């Protein structure tokens, strides 16, 4: 099936979160708009790939929803001009898969 590929560079090592775009300028985007069956999130550090997290899109949506609901994750506005709604999800929540 199709795979959506995103790269998380450096900052995840300090925050222990990954950032997943949900909307941009009020339009669904990222996780909420993908037509892929799988989501690959590459964790890189100083240009080197450290890990690749691969999840079915539906499972990732469930993890994001539960993580935010339980207060571990949170939704913020970010990106250029704070135009993107972004879910910050702890790596631990991804590893446990709820």
Image (cartoon, rainbow, N blue to C red):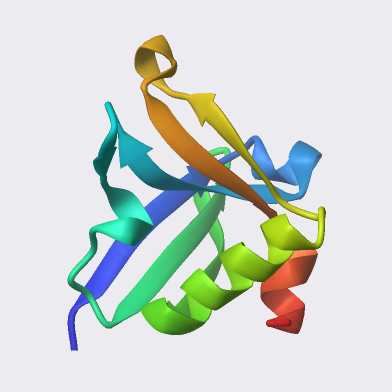
Q: Place residue 63 in its image quadrant.
A: bottom right
Report whether 28 appears left or right of 41. left
Q: Is any part of residue 56 visible from this angle?
A: no
Q: Residue at x 27, y 26 (%)?
A: 25
Q: Is any part of residue 88 visible from this angle?
A: yes
Q: Residue 97 location in percent, x, y? A: 68, 82
Q: Residue 71 location in percent, x, y? A: 81, 53
Report whether 92 appears left or right of 87. right
Q: Is residue 94 above or below residue 84?
A: below
Q: Nearer the viewer, residue 54 or 64?
A: 64
Image quarter where the N terminus lies is bottom left
Q: Nearer the viewer, residue 73 or 5?
A: 73
Image quarter where the C terminus lies is bottom right
Q: Is residue 81 above or below residue 26?
A: above
Q: Residue 72 location in percent, x, y? A: 81, 55
Q: Residue at x 50, y 74 (%)?
A: 60
Among all residues in the image, which is located at the extreme top?
81
Q: Residue at x 29, y 32 (%)?
A: 26
Q: Residue 65 location in percent, x, y? A: 60, 65
Q: Residue at x 72, y 52 (%)?
A: 73
Q: Is residue 19 above or below residue 81?
A: below
Q: Place residue 2 in its image quadrant.
A: bottom left
Picture mark count:
0
Q: Is residue 1 above or below residue 46?
A: below
């Amino acid at each position: 099936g199709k795979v959506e590929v995103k790269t998380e560079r450096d900052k995840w090592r300090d925050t222990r979160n990954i950032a997943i775009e949900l909307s941009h300028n009020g339009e669904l985007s990222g996780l909420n708009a993908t037509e892929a069956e799988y989501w690959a999130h590459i964790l890189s550090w100083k240009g080197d790939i450290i890990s690749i997290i691969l999840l079915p899109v539906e499972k990732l949506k469930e993890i994001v929803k539960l993580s935010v609901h339980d207060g571990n994750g949170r939704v913020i506005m970010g990106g250029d001009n704070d135009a993107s709604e972004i879910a910050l999800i702890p790596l631990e929540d991804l590893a446990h898969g709820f």
